[in-house]
Image (tube, grey):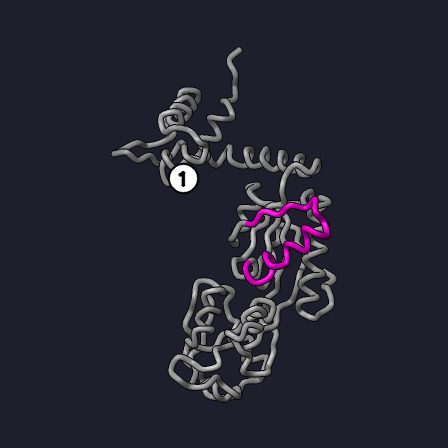
Amino acid sequence: MRRQAPPLEAIEAFILASRATSFRDAADRLALSPSAFSRRIQALEAFVGVPLFVREKGSATLSRTGQRYLRTIEPAIDAIRRATVDLQAERGGTALRVIVPQSFALAWLIPNLPALQRDAPSTRVELRVGRAVRELKRGHADVAILAGPASPPDMPSVRLARLSAIAVSARTLADGRPAPDTLADLAGCSRLACYQPEGIWENWLRGVGYAGPPLDPPTYFEAHFLMIEAAAAGLGVALTPPILAARLLEDGRLIQPLPQVADVGVEYRLVYADDQVRRRPDVARFTRWLVDGIAAADGTEPPLS
């Protein structure tokens, strides 16, 4: 009887090729030579009976048939990957894979991971920087720490912290002026902000009751850690949760020139790939450790939801 499903190694090569910039790049990820990788793709195309890639001038892109085939099989392959990882995790054979914003990883998570290793040595953590929930759905990670106004509606999650922000800056700004002493002084200062999450400055100014003249638009940065470094260099005043600026404040590279603190409409949530992941013992330990640790660093009570 002719087999009805192609070899999994050919499917794996096909999916990698669809996501990589070239066959060579995909071959490197599988530790194969380009010719060996191409043979896997050719074997799959021979098996299904149609070309899956359009090849021209040394490049290969998915054909329309290939795109349709990828949409059909990708969820099944991701389900196989997820089921395999879950079984390995139940036996302690794999690490907990965490998607995390770079700013949170550098400012709090990585410096505190040694404490987790001491308290729960069997819980191994692998970090991946990003914000993409789709990586959870594809089985490429187990949990994600996300910052935003809301959690994905179709995925289980727990609130880690509701974020309030303080203003931070260098003691002396780049133009030679001192850091602002009052809210009114903001009218003469450059403000720094991140593209995401949106509306941080608007929420903060409303929360602290700012009643001064309209302010110039902020200068935007792609990532929080870039914004904070810009503030430490004297380029302006930034808003940040204290937990993300604690080390720079302790080192004296940043100061908190204004005493006001306000909720900015953002929270950290831990999002799980699915309910089965949420119930895993290593994930439960990691969740409890995160909730308690962030609450202690923030000086707040652990959230209830």
Q: Residue 232: tell me if it is visible.
A: yes
Q: Of helix, strand and loop, which one carries label 1?
A: loop
Q: Is residue 2 above or below residue 64?
A: above
Amino acid type shown at disc 1 = Ala
Res. 50 visible in picture: no
Q: Quarter-wise, where is residue 106 in the image?
A: bottom right
**Whole-percent x, y for residue 287 in the image:** 69, 53
Q: Is residue 228 above or below residue 289?
A: below
Report the magenta stretch's main SS: helix
Coordinates of residue 257 in the picture (x, y in percent): 54, 82
Neighbourhood count class around disc 1 (C-alpha, 10 Å): few under 14, some 14–19, many 20 upward: some
On the image, the x and y values in percent for residue 78 come to: 56, 37
Q: Quadrant of residue 298?
A: bottom right
* Callout count: 1
Task: Please identify the residue farthest to the top as the structure is shown.
Answer: 1
Residue visible at 63% across and 52% down? 271
Left or right: 277 in relation to 254: right
Which stretch appears magenta?
Answer: 106-127
Q: Is residue 114 magenta?
A: yes
Q: Quarter-wise, where is residue 14 in the image?
A: top left
> Residue, x 32% and y 32% (percent of image)?
54
Front residue of 149/281: it is 281
For residue 215: magenta? no
| 251, 81: nearer the viewer | 251
Q: Residue at x 52, y 58 (%)?
A: 102
Q: x, y (%) of residue 129?
A: 52, 52
Residue that extends furthest to the left in the rendered view of this protein: 57
Horizontally, residue 8 falls left or right of residue 26, namely right
Q: Which residue is mark 1?
A: 20
Q: Quadrant of the C terminus?
A: bottom right
Residue at 72% x, 63% y: name it: 303
